[in-house]
Image: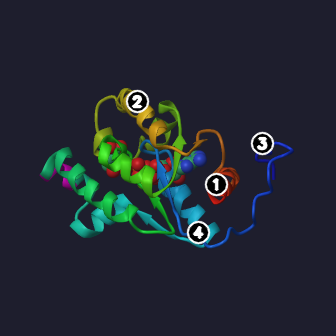
Amino acid sequence: MNCNDTPAADAPPVPAKPAAATHSIILVGLMGAGKTTIGRLLSRHREMEFVDSDYEIVARCGVSIPTIFEIEGEAGFRKRESAMIDELTQRQGIVLATGGGAVLDPVNREHMKARGIVVYLHCSPQELFLRTRHDRNRPLLQTEDPLARLQALYAQRHPLYLEVADIVIDSGKQSTHCLVRRLEQELARVEAAADQA
Ligand SMILES: Nc1ncnc2c1ncn2[C@@H]1O[C@H](COP(=O)(O)OP(=O)(O)OP(=O)(O)O)[C@@H](O)[C@H]1O
Ligand SMILES: O=C(O)C1=C[C@@H](O)[C@@H](O)[C@H](O)C1
Ligand SMILES: [Mg+2]
């Protein structure tokens, strides 16, 4: 197995199974970056509970995200999302996949930064376009030119994702298996630094 992500020679080894964590790991990034996919895999690897904020909103409302956008507009969805982010970031020891736009609200950003280790799954708009082009479940991409929309969202949000992130991982060119391995290496470093503080 070659992940092309060999850590530096002096980097600490990655623990096979980290000790039960009390902190949460919060994944941010644009639509299609892999927050749900990687979050679920990471949670299995760490034996932590996985929670997806989009899924929780849908479960509580009983209707899909496109339907919430249709009835309440984006503003209505954002209100629900902010309440959900506040609630979920208060939980400890979970892997939390956030919605792609959760970083837009400064209060959400403060909650994320203060309450967990934040991981930005970074990906280019072109790659995101390839991953999401057949999906009808993302209302913001139901436009004539979804690539242009992704480029605009990237320009707006990339600085916000960077602002909240403790770890930035490039999710574009690696398999999900390699990404989780790489993420564990980065998490081990951040967790060790936090333990010493
Ligand atoms: N590293 C990867 N390499 C290739 N494909 C990937 C990778 N990560 C995720 N994908 C694929 O991209 C698609 C979108 O992934 P996912 O739903 O996890 O993104 P997301 O960040 O949760 O998006 P959203 O913000 O819309 O919820 C899925 O089909 C998934 O299988
Ligand atoms: O990037 C966004 O603004 C969104 C991303 C999805 O996760 C959903 O939260 C919703 O489709 C909006
Ligand atoms: Mg998702």
Find the magenta span and give its range.
67-71
Q: Amino acid at mark 1?
A: Leu
Q: Main secondary structure of the magenta part?
A: helix
- Residue 24 at x, y = what percent? 50, 63
In the picture of the structure, the residue carrying the numbered disc 3 is 4
In the picture of the structure, the residue carrying the numbered disc 2 is 147
Q: Nearer the viewer, mark 2 or mark 3?
A: 3
Q: Amino acid at mark 4?
A: Ala
- Ranked by sequence position, the earlier of labels 1 and 3 is 3
In the picture of the structure, the residue carrying the numbered disc 4 is 21
- For residue 113, above or below residue 122: below
The picture quadrant where one finds residue 62 is bottom left
Q: Nearer the viewer, mark 1 or mark 3?
A: 1
At a point 65% along the width and 50% down the height, the residue shown is 179
In the picture of the structure, the residue carrying the numbered disc 1 is 187
Q: Are marks 1 and 4 in contact (CB under 8 Å)?
A: no
Q: Nearer the viewer, mark 3 or mark 4?
A: 4
- Report, in whole angstroms, how far the alpha carbon at label 2 lies from the one at label 4: 38 Å
- Report, in whole angstroms, how far the alpha carbon at label 2 lies from the one at label 3: 29 Å
- Residue 39 at x, y = what percent? 53, 59
- Residue 54 at x, y = what percent? 34, 58
- Report, in whole angstroms, how far the alpha carbon at label 1 lies from the one at label 2: 32 Å
- Report, in whole angstroms, how far the alpha carbon at label 3 lies from the one at label 4: 28 Å
Q: Amino acid at mark 3?
A: Asn
At a point 34% along the width and 30% down the height, the residue shown is 149
- Report, in whole angstroms, how far the alpha carbon at label 1 lies from the one at label 3: 18 Å
The secondary element bearing badge 3 is classed as loop
